[in-house]
Image (cartoon, rainbow, N blue to C red):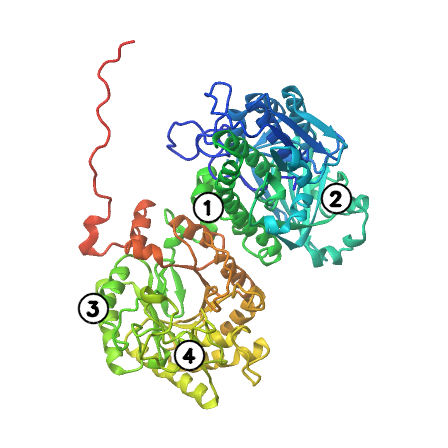
Amino acid sequence: MAGAVAVPAPGPSRPPGAPSGPGAPSRPPETAAGPGHRPSDTAPAPARNGSVRRIAVIGGGPGGLYAAALLKRLDPDREVTVFERNAPDDTFGFGVVLSDETLGGIEHADPEVYRALCREFVRWDTIDIVHRGRTHTSGGHGFAALGRRRLLEILHKRCAGLGVDLRFRVPAPPADALAADHDLVVAADGVHSATRQAHPEAFGPAVTEHRNRYIWLAADFALDAFRFEIAETPHGVMQAHGYPYAADASTVIVEMREEVWRAAGLDTCDPAESAARCAAFFSEALGGRPLRGNRSSWLAFRTVTNSRWSHGRTVLIGDAAHTAHFSIGSGTKLAVEDALALAACVEEQPDLPAALAAYEAERRPVVASTQRAAAASLRWFEELAGYVDQPPRRFAFNLLTRSRRVTHANLRLRDASFTAAVEEEFGCRPGTPPMFTPLRLRGLELRNRVVVSPMDMYSAVDGLPGDFHLVHLGARALGGAALTMTEMVCVSPEGRITPGCTGLWNDEQALAWRRITDFVHTSAPGTAIGVQLGHSGRKGSTKLMWEGIDQPLDGGNWPLAAASPLPYAPGVSQVPAELERAGLDAVREQFVSAARRAAAAGFDLLELHCAHGYLLSGFLSPLTNHRTDAHGGSLRNRLRFPLDVFDAVREVWPGERPMTVRISATDWAEGGTDAEDAVTIARAFAEHGADAIDVSTGQVVPEERPEFGRSYQTPYADRIRNAVGVPVVAVGAISSWDDVNSLLLAGRADLCALARPHLYDPHWTLHAAAEQGYTGPGAPWPLPYAAGSRPPPTGRTDGPGPRLTLG
């Protein structure tokens, strides 16, 4: 995908190649190929890989040309041929944006190309977000762009000067034919790669087409900033991404949901008419000036991944191997970085198989991270209509941080005044980070937005919480989080996951829990403690986690019950009994009895566990509910029993105490619960009186395929919060206080629940406050711990400087 990067790389504006962040050490910049890959005029030449003598490059885009130039420059005796089916001056798209990191790699790999690029660049450092007649400007972002055609001319000249054989208007022979008489075939043949399509069994491609439509256009004047323009039309919400790439030209990408595109009649327009209509939609931003195309057509973005990037002597680079949505990173940037890494690995490794393996091992994690960020950005724009009613500054902050690569702290470093205005609109007191603002749920005021997430400890005996639970929960309650949640507390012996699970099915257990809640309220005043009630359903009667997660007990099993008689792991797990009417009524009463005991035990909040494939979750998911009665079939029917339990519990739970519901917002499996279903489920519980929705995902079926990554579940919380208007708890690989601040300030969550960070550091919240220099009421240190509120001094590791230096 030729194109633009529509979000800056993390870090403040800085010279190309400079290390990022305050106080960054002085060191040579890392190229896109990784630390140490700096083939330059002055660097010592690595030992050459003598096995790669003849190289064919399929595709004369920037990635293919740059790979050819580097491979030839590193060994002038190589024979390098580039096959390009188009003419030299044929190109699609308009501007190309390259990051500082990419430019640093180019500078060290080929200073001549770097100098030529620098002479052409248009630079700017501000982003304008225009929405409902208001422009919000954020500075400190640092972009550099040039025309795609000019970039190609620079690379053509460099290749020709090095002796690369450039063959224009010549379709490349198939990769396997080229591999017969070449040592290396570089397939840089784009998103529709014929090489990839010819060998699907070798590369294992997956291509996902997305729901937005977009078109690349240009304006014959230079915008003075990177500009996001939102147009709310009678047909729906549209957006334009624009940036200058020359003194007299700007790229303008117009994007919208497919249904908006069709409603506006753009699906029947020819390219010229599309450009004219888009110019009319964004006439104010363009000052009434026209837009023009360049063989422009409406496209749906396609995310390309491959299980493998090489096959024999053939290797994929750029869009042939992977794509990332234009709103975060251009195909040009990734392709150039691929070329740098490939050339370095060919030089460093003893033979071609080792070089291709090293190239893929090096680039795949970088590309995967970029694709995760790009996917988050893409989804944000797909759901743009759900954000347009946000307060104006929050909307702008949300847009800037949509990919999770730009964060609250990072944006404050770039533009402190903009970030301060967003914080003020959010309601932060002066000097108060967003995470330390209070939140009220019914009669409970939480002094900050941090929750210790429920974590099963599997350390009870006969459901009785003991000293371990007192110390575990007490330590985390002392650690500063506003709300500490218990593990899933089971409503019956048969509702346990393992023999080590806690319960609330008898009064002895309630008294043991009272001991813990009394400790929290007495020793950590102002801290709330919540109970999560649940029933294991078909996932019960299993071993302790560390003995074999989800594996049935070797003996002493108890009978299981579920929505349908479907074992969790076929051939391994027990087959549960399908609950009939009497069984449904009995389970509901078990929840009610447990809720009464929880209230008497002094819990401040109750959460109903309807996630992770346990009993109530099993009713919600079509993958686990195959019933044909009133509790199966449609989502409305599948909601019936979980809502029945919720209503019964809410009736006995004290009215001033809040009640939340945890759901799995996606099953991560085909045919299961999806994001649309999750909105419907959340809305139903909210209408029945849920004070917040705790939005988790997955763990419903063993064949799930989660998209793991930092904060990977938060888009589902975001979607529910903005679609339903109910407070949400975000969970899922939230690990830093910067993430928490960013999620809250962007309006993606009201509370953030963290599990593993609180296992690593029970005082995570207090330490987050100390690291941000916050000492206010949102994070008071317990009086016995007050002396530890500052980091202890450490021994010096630096020696005294020299007294005298002689030349």
Label at residue 407: 1
Label at residue 279: 2
Query: x, y (%) of residue 570?
Result: 48, 73
Q: Nearer the viewer, residue 523 or 791?
A: 791
- Badge 1 density bin: few <14, some 14–19, many ≥20, Cα 10 Å: many
Query: x, y (%) of residue 439?
Result: 40, 61
Residue marked by disc 4: 650
Asked whether the beta carbons under mark 2 and mark 3 sit within 8 Å of each other, the answer is no
- Badge 2 density bin: few <14, some 14–19, many ≥20, Cα 10 Å: many
Label at residue 467: 3
- Amino acid of disc 4: Arg
Q: Nearer the viewer, residue 177 or 695?
A: 177
- Amino acid of disc 2: Ala
- Amino acid of disc 3: Asp
Asked whether the beta carbons under mark 3 and mark 1 sit within 8 Å of each other, the answer is no
Element carrying mark 3: helix
Element carrying mark 1: loop
In space, the residues marked 4 and 3 are separated at their CA atoms by 30 Å
- Badge 4 density bin: few <14, some 14–19, many ≥20, Cα 10 Å: many
Q: Nearer the viewer, residue 680 or 757?
A: 757
Q: Closer to the observer: label 2 or label 1? A: 1
- On the question of residue 512 being in view, the answer is yes
Whichever of labels 4 and 1 marks the residue nearer the N terminus, that label is 1
Q: Residue at x 53, y 71 (%)?
A: 681
- Badge 3 density bin: few <14, some 14–19, many ≥20, Cα 10 Å: few
